[in-house]
Image (cartoon, rainbow, N blue to C red):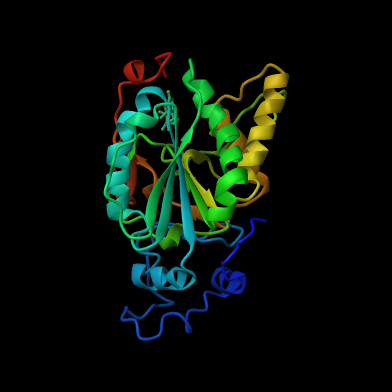
């Protein structure tokens, strides 16, 4: 597991196992929690007893105070290769308004166009680190390459500079609070397209046994997006990178690149928090009644124009 450096491991254990906030939330004003009432239109717990996080299942004041006590350092790892640098400004500006406000956040921007990283006024305890990466001719290579480059940055830098990490697609903007309720050892987000009434055999998992991302039809919990996930910098990305390298050796590319490997990992290494699609919606889609808040959303983009090799 990740070295927590100046981080109080014991506090973390308390937080994640017992939610013992008597020591951290005294004198806070918040509504009394109930054992009887709450949202009834969604399931707020997985069958491995992890929280399934939706608006209305946590009190932001309480949850922020619990994590603030530890004052974790959070790394946001993003890629802006080629024309995707155009998305940086809105992502960071809205991140400053809504993403873990009041916490220590560093944006690790991996780019081949360092001169296009915008100057944005950041809050206290927040900064930008630029990491140079090579350009790519295929968007698939950027997406797959993320695993390699992010793994290198984690090992070289982030491991010493952060306690939690979030990987995020850059073509997104924050619309609303994305707070400490999202933090855990391994937090994964339900893909908005498959979170309701999709039988597991219809999930777009990799179905070819020749790929390391293969999942048989009778297995699966949820279908997770690779566009937002977080955790302690554990082994997930390294695993995905190694599996995709194996696939390359065997001349196969998983159907949804890193997302396929990530889904395989998460099936056998259950996340400690599952975040609802509030934690990644899309401007392409109507917002249904059970999504009370869109916290971050993928922008509508002209694929043919922004991707080096166009297309979907
Ligand atoms: N990306 C990039 N340059 C590219 C293609 C992709 O920087 O030419 C990065 C960028 O961070 C983007 C992510 O890879 O958010 C995922 O790619 P994309 O958004 O095209 O995938 P989609 O979610 O639309 O399938």
Q: Position of residue 78 (x, y in %)?
A: 44, 39
Instruction: Give the total number of marks visible in the rendering.
Output: 0
The quarter of the displayed image where residue 200 is located: top right
Q: Position of residue 222 (x, y in %)?
A: 54, 44
Q: Position of residue 87 (x, y in %)?
A: 32, 33
Q: Is residue 168 above or below residue 83?
A: below
The quarter of the displayed image where residue 37 is located: bottom left
Q: Residue furthest front?
A: 115
Residue in view at x 46 percent, y 39 percent: 194
Q: Is residue 213 left or right of residue 127?
A: right
Residue in view at x 55 percent, y 38 percent: 150
Q: What is the quadrant of the C terminus in the image? A: top left
Quadrant location of ligand 1? top left
Q: What is the quadrant of the N terminus in the image? A: bottom right
Question: Does the image show residue 43?
Answer: no
Q: Is residue 83 left or right of residue 10?
A: left
Q: Is residue 217 above or below residue 140?
A: below
- Compare residues 310 and 282 and report the one nearer the observer: 310
- Compare residues 90 and 264 and report the one nearer the observer: 90
Q: Residue furthest bottom?
A: 27
Q: Is residue 162 above or below residue 260?
A: below
Q: Position of residue 297 (x, y in %)?
A: 33, 41
Q: Is residue 245 left or right of residue 103?
A: right
Question: Does the image show residue 120?
Answer: yes
Q: Is residue 91 above or below residue 41?
A: above
Q: Is residue 3 left or right of residue 305?
A: right
- Compare residues 55 and 165 and report the one nearer the observer: 165
Residue in view at x 34 percent, y 38 percent: 172
């Amino acid at each position: 597991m990740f070295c927590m450096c100046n981080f109080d491991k014991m506090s973390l254990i308390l937080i994640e196992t017992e939610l013992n906030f008597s020591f951290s939330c005294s004198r806070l004003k918040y509504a009394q929690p109930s054992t009887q009432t709450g949202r009834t239109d969604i399931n707020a717990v997985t069958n491995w007893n992890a929280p399934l996080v939706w608006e209305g299942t946590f009190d932001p004041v309480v949850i922020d105070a619990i994590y603030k006590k530890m004052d974790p350092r959070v790394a946001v790892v993003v890629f802006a290769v080629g024309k995707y640098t155009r998305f940086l400004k809105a992502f960071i500006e809205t991140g400053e308004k809504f993403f873990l406000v009041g916490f220590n956040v560093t944006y690790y921007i991996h780019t081949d166009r360092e001169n296009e990283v915008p100057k944005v006024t950041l809050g206290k305890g927040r900064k930008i680190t630029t990491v140079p990466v090579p350009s790519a001719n295929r968007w698939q290579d950027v997406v797959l390459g993320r695993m390699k480059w992010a793994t290198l940055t984690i090992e070289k830098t982030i491991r010493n500079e952060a306690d939690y990490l979030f990987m995020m697609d850059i073509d997104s903007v924050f619309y609303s609070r994305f707070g400490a309720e999202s933090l855990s050892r391994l937090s994964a987000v339900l893909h908005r397209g498959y979170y309701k009434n999709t039988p597991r055999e219809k999930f777009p998992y990799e179905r070819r046994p020749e790929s390391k991302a293969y999942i048989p039809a009778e297995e699966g919990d949820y279908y997770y997006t690779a566009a937002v996930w977080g955790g302690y910098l554990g082994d997930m990305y390294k695993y995905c990178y190694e599996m995709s390298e194996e696939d390359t050796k065997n001349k196969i590319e998983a159907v949804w690149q890193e997302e396929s490997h990530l889904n395989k990992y998460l099936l056998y290494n259950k996340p400690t928090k599952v975040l609802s699609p509030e934690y990644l919606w899309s401007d392409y889609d109507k917002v249904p009644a059970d999504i009370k808040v869109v916290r971050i959303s993928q922008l509508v983009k002209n694929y043919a124009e922004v991707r080096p090799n166009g297309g979907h």
